Amino acid sequence: MRCWKLLLEYEGTRYRGWQIQHNAKSVQGELTDAVRELFESRAEIYGSGRTDAGVHAVGQVVHLKVPDIKKEVTPRQLQNAINDLLPHDINVRAVEKANPEFHARHDAVGRSYIYQIATRRTAFGKTHVWWVKDRLDLRAMQVAAEMVTGRHDFASFCEKEEGKKQSTVVKVDYSNVFMDEDMICYRIAASHFLWKMVRRLTGMLVEVGRGNLGYDGFQRLLKFQSDVPAKHTAPPSGLFLEQVLYKGDKLITDEKAVYQIP
């Protein structure tokens, strides 16, 4: 069994998310089609986690396992071969050999997302940001973001998957709002995330920034279940899976946007 660890970036606008779906374009589906052209035997392609429709990634990690290959291939050769077959909005940034037991999802110890809010209208970056017309109080958003750090029940901030029992308690290791030129960015890191959790947290941080929600009100959402965050879910356009962490990795905390408005 040969195993490689792939680092992917993709612009998610044209896709219904990471995971393969029937009758819909997905990032995993496009990658699977490309790999199928390179290997005779059936390959296993597994991502570190799912991203929703319209959500982007600069640091998605994937394992590629092939049970039998007749010709040796270097990581660079594999990277170039796959990229030659992928559409323009999906790119393999790096490839490295991995232990056959490596699993992109199960071995991950943490993940981080960054959400980008534009403070001005843009002709070029609309699919990579959420433009909020109102003036936002950056300091107020920073104070509220700090409240997210630690172990909380995020039942108010997630969409429950039908027929799936899942704890809504998550330990957040990092939660920070910062400004980079014309962009207000929210970076959050945790061992795992719930469906729509980051987008709903972002939506309520914007409400704090607008002055529509105070600190006490934001904190109550972390203690008591409410359907209010669902009404303020931020659009997928501004969300990026930034980093997947494995044992020994260090979290990126540079106060820089992953995409900057020209």
Image: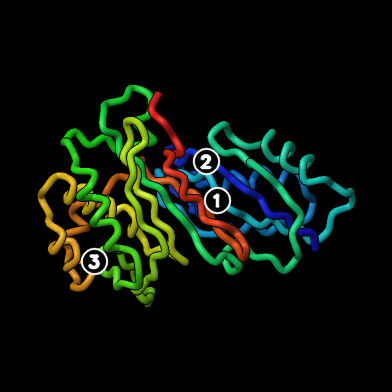
The coloring applied to the image is rainbow
Q: Residue at x 38, y 28 (%)?
A: 261
Query: Crowdedness of circle 1 by 10 Å Cα count: few (<14), some, many (20+)?
Result: many
Residue closest to the eye, 79 or 144: 144
Residue under numbered circle 3: 156
In percent of width and height, residue 141 lies at 23, 50
Name the side, left or right, on which 46 lies relative to 71.
left
Q: Is residue 60 left or right of residue 14?
A: right
* Amino acid found under the numbered disc labelled 3: Ser
Which residue was labeled with disc 2?
Answer: 10
Residue lying at the far left of the rendered structure: 212
Q: Quadrant of the N terminus?
A: bottom right
Q: Is residue 28 left or right of residue 73?
A: left
- Marks 1/2 in contact by CB < 8 Å: the verdict is yes
Lower position in the chain sequence, tag 1 or tag 3: 1
Total numbered circles: 3
Q: Position of residue 253 (x, y in %)?
A: 46, 50
Q: Estimate the spatial distance between the alpha carbons at disc 3 and disc 2, rounded to whole Å.
A: 29 Å
> The C terminus is located in which quarter?
top left
Task: Give coordinates of residue 80: x percent, y percent.
Answer: 73, 36
Residue of label 1: 60
Residue 69 in the image: state x and y as whole percent: 85, 54
- Image side of residue 258 versus residue 153, left or right: right
Q: The residue tagged with tag 1: helix, strand or loop?
A: strand
> Callout 3: 10 Å neighbours few (<14), some, many (20+)?
many
Classify 116 as above or below 99: above
Residue situated in front as seen by the camera: 262 or 252: 252
The amino acid beneath tag 2 is: Tyr
Give how far apart the Cα atoms at labels 1 and 3 are.
26 Å
Q: Is residue 197 visible?
A: yes
